[in-house]
Amino acid sequence: MMTTGSATGDALVVRPATRLRGRPGLPGDKSISHRALLLALLAEGESRITAAGDGDDVRSTAGVVAALGATVERVGERGGRVDYRVVSPGGDALQQPAAVLHCGNSGTTTRLLAGLLAGRPLAATLDGDASLRRRPMGRVTEPLTAMGASFAGPAGATLLPLEVRGRARLSPIAWTTPVPSAQVKSAILLAALAADGETSVTEGVTTRDHTERMLRARGVAVPEETLADGRHTVSLAGPAALNAVAETVPADPSAAAFWLVAGAIHPDAELLLDGVSTNPTRRAIIDILRRMGADIEEHDVPGTGGPDGEPLADLVVRSSELRSVDLSPAEVAAAIDEIPVLALAATVATGTTRIRGAGELRHKESDRIAGIADGLTALGARVRVTGDDIEIDGGRRLAGAVTETHDDHRLAMTFAIAGLIAEGETIVRRPGSAAISYPGFFAELQGVRA
Ligand code: S3P
């Protein structure tokens, strides 16, 4: 494996590995790391966050938390993870930011921050990179406007750069999310902390529940209810203040997904993955791969001291004979960040895989439906896209080719994993975006083939 070319137009060359062994180091969960920093900003006093993700997205959140008046110190670094000490004046004493709040490539930073700021008497401008400026923000500005915050920005405040004008007291709302989105749910819950009365969010598919767990761990009641029609509601009675806590971040299952697929599709593989979150709202990738025939062992480990009760497991994945799978829109929502690498698994599984209702993938860091289809097709896969559905004929022998990442971290890592089994050389163009969520990824890729 080597890197060629200039820093801006660089490419990674990946050759097939004869065997895969080892214990790749994993980043701290990105979703939990963002939330731990933002909740530390709202909690007066000292919070400790151990083993957080150290990718560019989490760094963007750390930057905005500091810009809003908290002291954010990096007090330790191990295995590509970072420990933070955050001391905050608390949510009622946030500082008016002196400059634009840069969210980089991070949709989670932007949308959760919009919710947090909605209920604070400040004016702030949120901006991001070219990818983030294309991503839809109306899904948060609409409910937050209904609660009393004001937004200004392009296309009716549905795109960055976005000016947020918050209010010390918001009105509670009962909101039903039109598309499953943990970011939207979380933005509304963060605003609900400053609302007079009970706010509720109802979703058709239960999305990741880290915000609810982490608010509870900080002393805020967040009751939940499954309705007769199967929909799920969470609620929060404001105004409410948070306690500062110390917590340890589990390993990111969305990062572990690359190794789960690598191990399952490679003919001579055994990989160990330590301390991965197996939260029911995040573990769909494990269950879907098992349904495809993947040999994945799961050994539960007691929590590492986090107050929010995230279940953890050590995972072992070995070479497997995979078969195709049919994924419903609800399963796609549950594995939304893992669909690119699952699509790679589908190319070698027997039979035709159907991934139905994947439209949300068009609104991620890139249009991931197009990116997956183009990259896997270049590698010799048969991929058909019809509307929001993707069909992949399995049983293919992939052959190295040039793949385009569109500066999307999950596409860069998916095509690099493909290179471990594709014949010849796989060229991953502009792979640097992997650092968005997994800065150590390419070093680990080198390590497991040794
Ligand atoms: C995230 C929610 C998901 C996911 C993203 C992280 C979160 O986005 O794709 O990577 O931390 O809440 P949506 O809420 O847009 O589905």
Image (tube, rainbow, N blue to C red):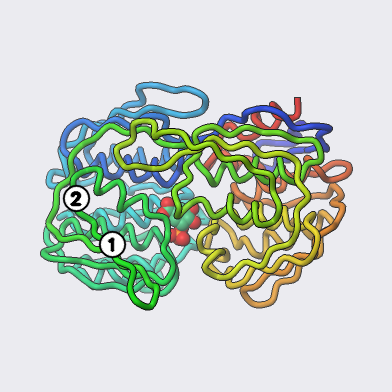
Of residues 15 and 118, the one drawn nearer to the viewer in this rendering: 15
Q: Using the image as rendered, state which of residue 106 and residue 291 is in the foreground.
A: 291
Rendering coords of residue 148 (x, y %): 18, 68
* Quadrant the N terminus occupies: top right
Q: Which numbered marker is on residue 224?
A: 1
Question: The residue under label 2 is which amino acid type?
Answer: Val
Which SS class for mark 1? strand
Q: CA distance from mark 2 to mark 1?
A: 13 Å
For the residues labelled 2 and 1, say whether their Cβ atoms are less than 8 Å apart.
no
Instruction: Indicate the quadrant where residue 356 lies.
Output: bottom right
Q: Is residue 205 left or right of residue 171?
A: right
Measured as percent of width and height from the top left, residue 105 is found at 48, 49
Q: Nearer the viewer, residue 130 or 409?
A: 409
Q: Secondary structure at mark 2?
A: loop
Judge whether residue 4 can be spotted in this image. yes
Q: At 44% across and 23% down in the image, what residue appears?
A: 77
Please identify the quarter of the rendering in which residue 45 is found: top left
Q: Nearer the viewer, residue 346 or 15?
A: 346
Q: Quadrant of the C terminus?
A: top right
Density class for disc 1 (Cα within 10 Å; few <14, some 14-19, many ≥20) is: some
Q: Residue at x 44, y 71 (%)?
A: 179
Please tell me which residue is depicted at 55% across the width and 57% down the height of the picture: 335
On screen, residue 112 versus residue 427, left or right, reads left
Judging by the rendered image, the residue that carries numbered circle 2 is 220
Whole-percent x and y of residue 326? 66, 67
Tell whether 288 sits left or right of 401.
left
